[in-house]
Image (tube, helix red, strand yellow):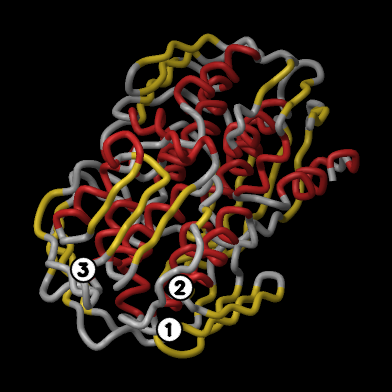
């Protein structure tokens, strides 16, 4: 489908961003592994999270969903049943990678697949640690791509993991931690760079002994997980589109309530602040194990910056829309150390560059990122989502300041992570045609 996008001069209002996608996945999985009942409020009912919910049903967990509230009845560690069907993860890499960790500890056989995009994505980085723990794993392309088959050892007991992860990935780390719950001793893993710690925070809140010492995480499996009622913060990755939009539109002020500001994934705030954005944090507080704040963002004159090192891991999902900000900023922005962008729902190095070029920006693709020369006006154009929800939303933000109308093909992909995106955009622009 195609949507028409028009430039605006003014943005005003409050946007209640939907629940955090990463935490929604993890709250479902960990409460399915707990024995007993729990309630998840603020759940993100997007396509990716619903895939996780449906897959967990195949393991015997029970769910009752009422909009953004989910009631969970968990099976308990060691009590998950062997799935009677293939688990379809759709487009969700988080679903596939985290459920690989779950499947590794199940005394039974699991098969995971996904759509064409997900079947192309490399899985060796998560499967190799699980093999080292004793899980039997196979799949396409030498056991590195979906469809994947996994079988935990008889009795469901794995060896503890001890080693360094190949990449800075919260999904890989979380898969290992989930598998480690079924191990017969203490697991210790080392990260090459800090990644988001939502899994560790939830595990600790559910009574699991998880400890961090610098780059190392240690987990001691014990007597199981206690069910946990969870209130999920608003998703910072979704809020990022409004943070950039309000920064680049000439007359803008937006309020984003109760957004998660976990420091292990708040790189987008650090990058925008370095670029000169006017972002205010109000009423910083804790929502369960997660820090949140009300964010107020206003128009600002942005300048180029460098995004590299650990900052990339803390802003990996926000880099496409940050590239839009860079195209409007004065000076040059360089994104380095971000080869991981090429392994997302699309090759986001290529698809982000294609988006910016279509709008008239000057951008250079590199193996590990982008070099963007900012400060030039953008113009209306025919834009492609590349089947990627974050590219589609970044395109919509760029169109707000382009000279002339844009046409975006593939607008429906936003349902993967932000089902109400077009409604929220219509609310703050006053353009009801987009609702």
Question: Within 10 Å of the Cα at label 3, are there few (<14), some (14-19), or many (20+) other Cα atoms?
Answer: some
- In this rendering, the answer to whether 97 lies above or below 230 is above
- In this rendering, the answer to whether 269 lies above or below 33 is above
Answer with mark 1 or mark 3, whichever residue precedes in sequence.
1
Side of 283 relative to 158 (left or right): right
Q: Alpha carbon of mark 2 to alpha carbon of mark 1: how far?
A: 8 Å
Give how far across and how far down residue 76 sits, in percent. Answer: 37, 84
Question: Within 10 Å of the Cα at label 2, are there few (<14), some (14-19), or many (20+) other Cα atoms?
Answer: many
Q: State the residue position of label 3.
A: 153
Give how far across and how far down residue 293 sits, in percent. Answer: 52, 62
Question: Which element is circle 2 on?
Answer: loop
Q: Which mark is residue 385?
A: none
Give how far across and how far down residue 80 sits, in percent. Answer: 39, 77
Answer with mark 2 or mark 1, whichever residue precedes in sequence.
2
- Picture quadrant where residue 72 is located: bottom right
Q: Alpha carbon of mark 1 to alpha carbon of mark 3: how far?
A: 19 Å
- How many marks overall? 3
Side of 390 relative to 372 (left or right): right
Q: State the residue position of label 1.
A: 75
Query: Residue extending furthest right?
Result: 433
Side of 62 relative to 305 (left or right): right
- In this rendering, the answer to whether 106 lies above or below 167 is below
Q: Is label 2 in contact with label 1 (beta carbons under 8 Å)?
A: yes
Front in this rendered view, residue 264 or 306: 264
Q: State the residue position of label 2.
A: 59
Q: Tell which tag, 1 or 3, sits nearer the viewer.
A: 3
Front in this rendered view, residue 301 or 39: 39
Question: Which element is circle 3 on?
Answer: loop
């Amino acid at each position: 489908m195609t949507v028409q996008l028009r430039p605006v001069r003014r943005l005003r209002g409050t946007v209640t961003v939907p629940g955090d996608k990463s935490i929604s996945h993890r709250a479902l999985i960990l409460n399915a592994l707990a024995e007993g009942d729990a309630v998840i409020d603020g759940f993100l009912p997007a396509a990716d999270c619903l895939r996780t919910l449906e897959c967990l049903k195949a393991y015997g967990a029970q769910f009752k969903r009422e909009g953004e509230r989910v009631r969970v009845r968990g099976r308990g560690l060691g009590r998950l049943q062997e799935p009677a069907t293939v688990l379809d993860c759709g487009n969700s890499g988080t679903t596939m990678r985290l459920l690989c960790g779950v499947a590794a500890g199940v005394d039974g056989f699991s098969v995971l697949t996904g759509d064409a995009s997900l079947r192309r994505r490399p899985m060796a980085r998560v499967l190799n640690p699980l093999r080292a723990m004793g899980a039997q794993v196979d799949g396409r392309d030498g056991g590195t791509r979906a469809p994947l088959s996994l079988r935990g050892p008889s009795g469901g007991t794995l060896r503890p993991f001890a080693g360094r992860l190949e990449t800075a990935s919260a999904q890989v780390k979380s898969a290992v931690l989930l598998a480690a719950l079924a191990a017969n001793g203490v697991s210790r893993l080392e990260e090459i760079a800090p990644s988001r710690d939502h899994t560790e925070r939830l595990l600790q809140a559910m009574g699991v002994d998880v400890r961090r010492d610098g780059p190392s995480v240690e987990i001691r499996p014990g007597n199981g997980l206690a069910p946990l009622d969870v209130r999920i913060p608003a998703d910072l990755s979704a809020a990022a589109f409004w943070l950039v939009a309000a920064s680049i539109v000439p007359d803008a002020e937006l309020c984003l309530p109760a957004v998660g500001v976990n420091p292990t994934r708040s790189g987008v705030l650090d990058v925008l602040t370095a670029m000169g954005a006017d972002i205010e944090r109000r009423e910083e507080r804790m929502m369960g194990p997660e820090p949140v704040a009300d964010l107020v963002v206003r128009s600002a004159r942005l300048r180029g910056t460098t995004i590299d090192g650990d900052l990339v891991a803390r802003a990996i999902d926000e880099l496409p829309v940050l590239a839009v900000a860079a195209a409007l900023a004065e000076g040059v922005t360089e994104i380095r150390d971000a080869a991981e962008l090429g392994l997302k729902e699309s090759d986001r190095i290529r698809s982000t560059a294609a988006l910016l070029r279509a709008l008239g920006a000057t951008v250079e693709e590199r193996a590990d990122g982008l070099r963007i020369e900012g400060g030039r006006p953008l113009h209306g154009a025919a834009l492609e989502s590349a089947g990627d929800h974050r590219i589609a939303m970044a395109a919509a933000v760029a169109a707000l300041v382009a000279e002339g109308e844009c046409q975006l093909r593939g607008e429906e992909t936003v349902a993967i992570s932000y089902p109400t995106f077009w409604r929220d955009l219509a609310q703050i622009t006053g353009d009801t045609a987009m609702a």
